[in-house]
């Protein structure tokens, strides 16, 4: 049986009817739209490549073990591939409203935890494909990998024929318990199995342990609560969503002129966006602290396409108090270099490994207790989340129609009212911004300021390139 890891299971524990733990993407395609039957046939023909899409989560009696994936004997493609349309004129605002409404509904735990929506009615005959998957199944990178399996890299790829499938029998309660404890013993044996290697290379083992300790200490120093801001606090079950775009060519111009990474430029732009949002709300942006959780992939190159979560995280203070975009970028570059050397991401892996060895019942009880506390006293350790996922840099197709753009969605957890997901696709960078419906009606200000921040940096970088070209 295929068990969820502790990190996978934690995304189930975090979900409580208010915080919905699914990730998603809105993909825009050229027209004309396919019929819903054509889309269902396409997905059905690809299901043998993604077996998880026909499996549901099965809990273990009394949480004696972590949940497992089992075949759904009542799987029905029509439940998972659905159909909707935008009201005229079908503009981007209408798409954003529909996206927010779809993301406000939790996935059914009694079924495989995914949905695909065919959305008609976009301008110029275009249509959308909204993919929604529970976070217990995928992280950002594996979610992109799965979407790439459903779509094609060649416009003329013929639609596949569905393969015959018979669900495996559901495991009995005793089998689930025995497998769970056998799996726990296997996890422990895996840890013990590393000891001979540590004994052969004690220096390397000590350095690794020291780096882990450094990361834990650095993480502990970043956990104290920040000053109160309107972007944090209690949330409701409903969501708003909007998006902004930038050209990867512009990002590369900025990098060539000022150094750093794509992620540095992205974080600097987000800092400019949050500064504008706080100023728009009349808050003291010059003295504000905005701490963001930045997921970091620890996925090995040979683990692409594996549907699970393999991430750690950094906690980073966005320099929202700085008005100059160049100075913001410089501060981001310096602080990210420091964070990467701090081994904070290693600390996340340590906690995940220890979690795999902890009794699942205790992990579940602790997680649910923490959620109940956060209902009354929202956490203020993390103000927002900023996740950046590299997507394919070549066009993808659905039934011969080219995907024109790909806009991501990130879920909100308790205490976090606004979050940003960034995803690159075929030369474009998209910022998908999620807001709590009741407390973040103005996330469009954040989206617009992110674009303005990148435009300002690109203009400065272009001027630098012109000066350098004249001096040669």
Image (cartoon, rainbow, N blue to C red):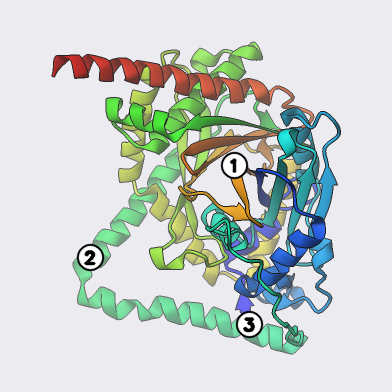
Residue 75 is drawn in which quadrant? bottom right
Residue 385 is drawn in which quadrant? top right
**Of the image marks 1 and 2, the number of the one nearer the N terminus:** 2
Kindly check if marks 3 and 1 are in contact, taking CB atoms under 8 A apart as contact.
no
Is residue 371 left or right of 448 when viewed as pictured?
Answer: right
In percent of width and height, residue 408 lies at: 61, 43
**Of the image marks 3 and 1, the number of the one nearer the N terminus:** 3
Residue position for label 2 = 204
Q: CA distance from mark 1 to mark 2?
A: 48 Å
| SS at mark 1 in the image | strand
Q: Which residue sits at x=53%, y=67%?
A: 306
In percent of width and height, residue 299 lies at: 44, 60
**Of the image marks 3 and 2, the number of the one nearer the N terminus:** 3
In percent of width and height, residue 452 lies at: 51, 19
- Observer-side mark, 1 or 2, equals 1
Of the pair 229 and 53, the residue shown nearer to us: 53
Residue position for label 1 = 404
Q: CA distance from mark 3 to mark 1?
A: 39 Å
Is residue 318 left or right of 334 when viewed as pictured?
Answer: right
In percent of width and height, residue 137 lies at: 63, 62
| SS at mark 2 in the image | helix
Note whether 163 is above or below 351 in the view shown: below
Number of labels in the image equals 3
Residue position for label 3 = 1
């Amino acid at each position: 049986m295929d068990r969820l890891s502790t990190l996978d299971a934690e995304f189930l524990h975090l979900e409580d009817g208010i915080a919905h733990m699914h990730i998603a993407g809105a993909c825009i395609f050229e027209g004309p739209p396919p019929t819903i039957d054509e889309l269902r046939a396409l997905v059905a023909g690809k299901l043998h490549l993604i077996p998880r899409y026909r499996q549901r989560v099965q809990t273990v009696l009394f949480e004696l073990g972590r949940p497992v994936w089992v075949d759904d004997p009542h799987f029905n493609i029509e439940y998972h591939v659905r159909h909707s349309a935008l009201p005229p004129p079908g503009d981007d605002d209408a798409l954003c409203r529909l996206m927010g409404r779809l993301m406000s509904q939790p996935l059914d735990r009694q079924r495989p935890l995914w949905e695909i929506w065919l959305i008609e009615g976009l301008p110029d005959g275009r249509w959308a494909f909204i993919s929604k998957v529970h976070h217990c199944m995928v992280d950002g990178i594996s979610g992109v990998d799965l979407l790439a399996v459903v779509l094609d890299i060649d416009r003329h790829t013929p639609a596949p024929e569905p393969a015959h499938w018979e669900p495996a029998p559901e495991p009995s309660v005793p089998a689930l318990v025995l497998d769970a404890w056998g799996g726990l013993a296997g996890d422990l044996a895996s840890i013990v199995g590393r000891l001979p290697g540590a004994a052969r290379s004690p220096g390397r083992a000590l350095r690794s342990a020291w780096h882990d300790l450094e990361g834990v200490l650095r993480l502990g120093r970043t956990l104290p609560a920040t000053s109160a801001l309107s972007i944090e606090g209690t949330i409701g079950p409903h969501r708003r969503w909007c998006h902004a775009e930038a050209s990867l060519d512009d990002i590369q111009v900025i990098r060539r002129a000022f150094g750093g990474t794509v992620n540095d430029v992205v974080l600097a732009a987000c800092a400019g966006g949050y500064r504008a949002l706080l100023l728009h709300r009349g808050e003291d942006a010059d003295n504000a602290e905005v701490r963001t959780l930045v997921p970091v992939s620890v996925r090995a190159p040979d683990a692409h396409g594996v549907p699970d979560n393999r991430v750690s995280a950094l906690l980073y203070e966005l320099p929202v108090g700085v008005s100059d975009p160049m100075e913001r970028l410089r501060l981001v570059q310096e602080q990210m270099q420091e964070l990467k050397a701090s081994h904070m991401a290693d600390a996340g892996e340590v906690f995940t490994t220890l979690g795999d060895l902890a009794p699942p019942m205790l992990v579940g009880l602790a997680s649910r207790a923490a959620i109940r506390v956060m209902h009354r006293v929202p956490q203020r350790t993390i103000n927002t989340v900023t996740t950046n996922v590299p997507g394919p840099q070549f066009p993808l197709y659905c039934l011969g129609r080219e995907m024109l753009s790909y806009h991501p969605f990130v879920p909100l957890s308790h205490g976090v009212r606004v979050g940003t997901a960034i995803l690159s696709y075929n030369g474009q960078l998209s910022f998908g911004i999620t807001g709590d419906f009741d407390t973040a009606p103005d996330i469009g200000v954040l989206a617009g300021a992110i674009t303005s921040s990148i435009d300002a940096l690109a203009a400065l970088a272009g001027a630098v390139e012109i000066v350098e070209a004249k001096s040669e």
